[in-house]
Image (cartoon, helix red, strand yellow):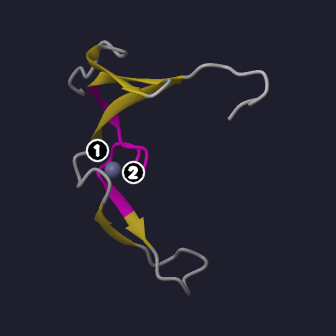
């Protein structure tokens, strides 16, 4: 049985507010979470096919390059919020 990988998602670890002129940029960092590798569906291995092998009969098994064979990946999230004043004449500029 797989070990439990449940971690609260959306766990904020840091916030950074920068002011650039009239613009306000807020960066929110979320706690990295462990997720199933989508490239290999958690198996850690992928099948490599030669390009002329259209029927995919002679696949070679290889270590998944995304998770390096662990079947799990760490996903870290960064949310960037940009706030700037609205000007009628300037539109969305
Ligand atoms: Zn993988």
Please say if the residues under marks 2 and 1 sit with CB atoms less than 8 Å apart: yes
Q: Quadrant of the N terminus?
A: top left
The spot of residue 88 in percent (x, y) is: 78, 21
Residue 72, placed above or below residue 50: above
Residue 10: image x %, image y %?
A: 37, 15
Task: Please indicate whether residue 43 sits to the left or right of residue 57 in the image.
Answer: left
The residue drawn where x is 60% and y is 19% is 85
Any magenta on residue 44? Answer: yes
Q: Is residue 36 magenta?
A: yes
Residue situated in front as seen by the camera: 51 or 92 = 92
Residue, disc 1: 71
Measuring 42% from the left and 26% from the top, which residue is drawn there? Answer: 79
Q: Can the viewer see residue 7 in this picture?
A: no
- Relative to 29, 58 lies left or right: right
Q: Residue at x 45, y 78 (%)?
A: 58
Note whether ligand 1 is within 8 Å of mark 1.
yes
Pointer 2 residue: 40
Query: Between residues 27 and 22, which one lies in front from this camera angle?
Result: 22
With respect to residue 35, does 24 lie above or below? above
| Quadrant of the image containing the C terminus | top right
**Magenta extent:** 32-46
């Amino acid at each position: 049985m797989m070990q439990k990988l449940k971690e609260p998602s959306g766990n904020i670890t840091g916030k950074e507010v920068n002011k650039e002129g009239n613009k306000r940029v807020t960066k929110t960092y979320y706690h990295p979470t462990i997720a199933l590798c989508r490239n290999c569906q958690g198996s850690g291995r992928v099948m490599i096919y030669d390009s002329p092998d259209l029927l995919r009969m002679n696949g070679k098994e290889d270590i998944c390059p995304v998770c390096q064979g662990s079947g799990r990946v760490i996903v870290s999230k960064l949310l960037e919020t940009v706030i700037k004043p609205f000007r009628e004449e300037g539109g969305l500029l």
